Amino acid sequence: MSKKEYKLEAKELNAYYGGFHALKGINIAMEEKTVTAFIGPSGCGKSTFLRTFNRMNDYIEGFRVEGEILLDSRDIYDKKVRVDELRKEVGMVFQKPNPFPKSIFENVVYGLKIQGIKKKSVLEEAAERTLRQAALWDEVKDKLQKSALALSGGQQQRLCIARALASQPSVLLMDEPASALDPISTAKVEELIYELKKEYTIVIVTHNMQQAGRVSDYTAFFYIGELVEYSKTKAMFTSPKDTRTQNYITGRFG
Amino acid sequence: MWLSAVITVLITISIIWVLLSESVKFFSEVSIVQFLTEKEWTPLFADKKFGILPLVAGTLLTTTIAIAVALPIGLTIAVYLNEYAHIRFRQIIKPMLEVLATIPTVVYGFFALTVVTPFLQSFIPGLAGFNALSAGIVMGIMIIPMISSLSEDAISSVPRSLREAAYGMGSTRLQTAFGVMVPAASSGIVVSVILAISRAVGETMIVAIAAGQQPRLTLNPLVPIETITTYIVQVTLGDVPHGSLEYRTIFAAGITLFVFTFALNNISFWIKKKYQEKYD
Ligand SMILES: Nc1ncnc2c1ncn2[C@@H]1O[C@H](COP(=O)(O)OP(=O)(O)OP(=O)(O)O)[C@@H](O)[C@H]1O
Ligand SMILES: [Mg+2]
């Protein structure tokens, strides 16, 4: 059996906030162009884990990791890795929409501008392409120069997705991207994730079991810093192996 | 409580009343057109000219130099403290900066006259002993803490989520600071600059000591000038008889100053109000 190439892997990953052991010996491997959902009760470490894939925890004082996180088989915590380059490869969408207080257009092309791309035609082309990808183009094409803050919450979140896509990442990390949205916007974001899977490897944290069921191929269940169970979403939802998983997805705690 | 409020209002009203009534008497003798257009200000000489422009030019000149010094330095400090400095370093450096603001301005004035001017003269040959440049630079140093401290507050009140968005996109610290945080904090930064301008416009001692007291309609920073406030001090300390026309010139100058600072305060108030709800 030949060794399989994974897009993202964690090997014996431990993470600490000072003396607090937040992630305990996690091993996981995710295939390219799949959607993996992280589920688990509040405080179990989903966000912490998600943020190790683009090293967003680096700024937290006292935070440290042991073990390895591999992106295309390269250790991203290696000293030679530049975090700014890493984050162009691994995009992130946050829980609360966080567009910059700039125009819609400036938001979308931000990632290109910081890479030094200034040519107007290139920027315009990229803006249209990613706004279409994020299913937002029709709603904003006539007001690209308007402030992004004037958009609805759902539109802002899709704008943030478009903004992340513009840097042409291969991985998209989403931390509860729909939890601050109304049901219609949520449905739109879910549809979008389904479409984006064709090109991107997506990891999504969610508290919504139905959502995990709808959008993900694989699901990982975390409990107090441990990865309890990781399998195909269907398998996990129909026949969870661990009683803690079972209790969680049937709503007995969490 | 209500008593102090009443007293404050009464004092304000009486100041404005004195300013206005004396100015009205002044303008009954000197026309406003002459006041605003004449290019010389020589009320204390035999050949009296009452053009406020030289004093306004002197004030604008020193103020512009001061802001040109204080804004880049103050903003850099604010950004450094916010994006780069360790929390403990920040806790030490902020009070130290604020000490700069508590040094008596007379000390700054002599610093400008006896240190900065000779230093500048060593490589600017045409620099007069009294000049706008030294006074402006030192005034800028004095208002650095004002800009850095208020800008720092403005930058640190930008929601954390924006910083995360910038870093999440692969921005470097510098790109995050100047591409996202500073623009997002721009209203607060502009307010700090306006307050700094009001402070510079009203500053008296440094200019009186280091810039000379020669009203001159020029934008050349190398020669002696006079500002509105220094003129007022000059007359107040001199032996001009009360109630004379010469004496009333200080009220006309005062009301000009009042118009400036009043306008600046209104602009800053308006900016604050306009941008207040942006992030709620
Ligand atoms: N900056 C921090 N400093 C110290 N401890 C932290 C920090 N951030 C998170 N933690 C702790 O680490 C643990 C995991 O937090 P994390 O945010 O990853 O949980 P989560 O699974 O995402 O929770 P939620 O579902 O509520 O978002 C929690 O116990 C939390 O208190
Ligand atoms: Mg979380």
Image (cartoon, grey):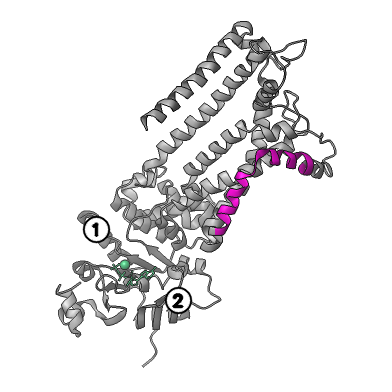
Find numbered disc 1 in the image and state the secondary structure of the residue it sits on. Answer: helix
State whether residue A39 is above or below residue B55: below
Quadrant into which the C terminus of chain A falls: bottom left
Label 1 sits on residue: A186
Q: Secondary structure at mark 2?
A: strand
Say if the magenta span includes residue B220. no
* Residue in the foreground of this view, choosing between B82 and B21: B21
Q: Nearer the viewer, mark 2 or mark 1?
A: 2
A245 vs B197: above or below: below
Q: Is residue A6 at least partly visible in the picture? A: no
Image quarter of the N terminus of chain A: bottom left
The overriding secondary structure of the stretch rendered in magenta is helix
Of residue B230 and residue B173, the one placed in the foreground of this image is B230
Q: Which residues are magenta?
A: B92-116
Quarter of the figure with residue A171: bottom left
For disc 1, the chain is A
The chain letter under disc 2 is A
Amino acid at pointer 2:
Arg
Q: Which residue is mark 2?
A: A64
User: Quick check: A68 left or right of B118?
Assistant: left
The quadrant in which residue B43 appears is top right
Is residue B110 on the magenta stretch?
yes
The residue at the point 66 percent across, 39 percent down is B105
Looking at the rendered structure, the kind of residue marked 1 is: Thr
